[in-house]
Image (tube, grey):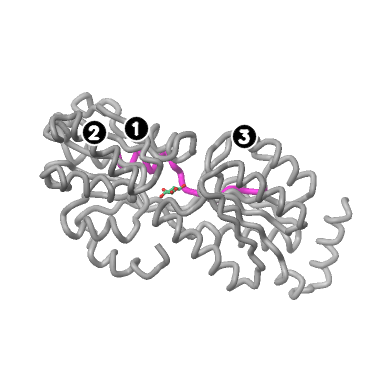
């Protein structure tokens, strides 16, 4: 038994609840590329406050090197745990090894890494492939036998949601030769790049006349693209179907106005399950499962989008 494990066990045995309340957690957030990301940040701060956790927040501004530097800083400070939403999937082995060496548990939020799962305590997130598949199946059910040329806005290159949501969508439309992805490019999960790339898609596809549907890996890119479609003189949601992922208030607003058709919800509360897992681990060393899965529900225009917008608009998105 290491000294740190011995101390943890002693604290638990003595029932020193106050000690458990004074935990310090470092959180390396990707940045603020989307409404969903903003909500995850807000909720993580709220969840920490409610539990009496001292949260050290670091914004990586979309750069992996900033996340690695933040983690190294957290390790040097001797935090009790690290939460990280990893911007890309590769390149984490060394820093995860440093955290492990320092006996600091690491919890991954919302995105995956390609490192061995014994390098971190647990990962909280959705089934990203399933999300894409749900979006693809929605399109299959919606267009039936009609020919449908799809343009795809991918998330940040090298990120697990971009990789998995692409795979999932392709799985969802597999076997339906009438549906074809004709253009696919990254929009970096942002509204502005989503809009720019959609403009180029529209131009290349006869002003949009040849496009039947847009699949965007997140709602923010879809919202940017909707603007581009309108500026091109077409009706989003009708001339071009729009399906995306996240469930942010603005996509529900667009759905309520008939300008978007479907979204697959990703909960922004990844921190709640993460802190629950950490509390049990700190208490008596309970090991959580390696993957704590959150739900992914499909919402369409039939699911009271105006009500969904009202319910979500003040939640920190
Ligand atoms: O990792 C989750 C994705 O990252 C969300 O779908 C997107 O909006 C965010 O930027």
Disc 2 on helix, strand or loop? helix
Location of mark 3 (residue): 91
Residue 185: give its label. Answer: 1
Q: Is residue 71 left or right of residue 259?
A: right
Q: Quadrant of residue 303?
A: bottom left
User: Does residue 89 lie above or below 49 as drawn?
Assistant: above
Give how far across and how far down residue 124 sits, in percent.
55, 51
Circle 2 sits on which residue? 201
Measured as percent of width and height from the top left, residue 100 is found at: 75, 45
> In the displayed structure, does residue 220 sit left or right of residue 3?
left
At x 25%, y 27%, the residue is 182
Q: Does residue 83 appear left or right of residue 252 in this picture?
A: right
**Label 3 secondary element:** loop
Looking at the picture, tell me which residue is in the foreground, 91 or 62.
62
Magenta stretch bounds: 121-135
Q: Observer-nearest residue: 204 or 263?
A: 204
Count every numbered label the image shows and give the total: 3
Marks 1,2: beta carbons within 8 A = yes
């Amino acid at each position: 038994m290491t000294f740190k494990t011995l101390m943890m066990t002693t604290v638990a045995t003595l029932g020193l609840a106050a000690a458990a309340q004074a935990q310090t957690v470092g959180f390396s957030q990707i940045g603020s590329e989307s409404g969903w990301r903003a909500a995850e940040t807000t909720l993580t701060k709220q969840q920490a406050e409610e539990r009496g956790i001292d949260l050290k927040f670091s914004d990586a501004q979309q750069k992996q090197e900033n996340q690695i530097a933040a983690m190294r800083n957290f390790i040097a400070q001797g935090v009790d745990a690290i939460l990280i939403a990893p911007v890309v999937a590769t390149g984490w082995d060394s820093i995860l090894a440093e955290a492990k060496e320092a006996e600091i548990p690491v919890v991954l939020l919302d995105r995956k890494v390609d490192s061995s799962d014994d390098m971190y305590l647990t990962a909280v997130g959705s089934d990203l492939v399933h999300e894409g598949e749900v979006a693809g199946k929605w399109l299959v059910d919606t267009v039936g036998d009609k020919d449908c040329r799809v343009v795809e806005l991918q998330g940040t290159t090298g990120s697990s949601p971009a990789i998995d949501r692409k795979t999932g969508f392709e799985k969802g439309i597999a076997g339906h030769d009438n549906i074809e992805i004709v253009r696919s490019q990254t929009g970096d999960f942002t509204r502005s790049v989503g809009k720019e790339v959609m403009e180029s898609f529209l131009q290349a596809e006869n002003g949009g006349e040849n496009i039947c549907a847009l699949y965007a890996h997140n709602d923010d890119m879809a919202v940017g693209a909707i603007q581009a479609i309108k500026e091109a003189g077409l009706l989003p949601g009708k001339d071009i179907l729009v399906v995306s992922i996240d469930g942010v208030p603005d996509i529900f607003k667009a759905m309520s106005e008939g300008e978007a058709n479907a979204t697959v919800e990703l909960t922004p509360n990844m921190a709640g399950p993460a802190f629950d897992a950490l509390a049990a681990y700190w208490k008596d060393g309970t090991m959580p499962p390696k993957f704590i899965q959150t739900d992914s529900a499909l919402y369409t225009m039939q699911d009271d989008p105006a009500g969904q917008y009202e319910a979500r608009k003040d939640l920190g998105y």
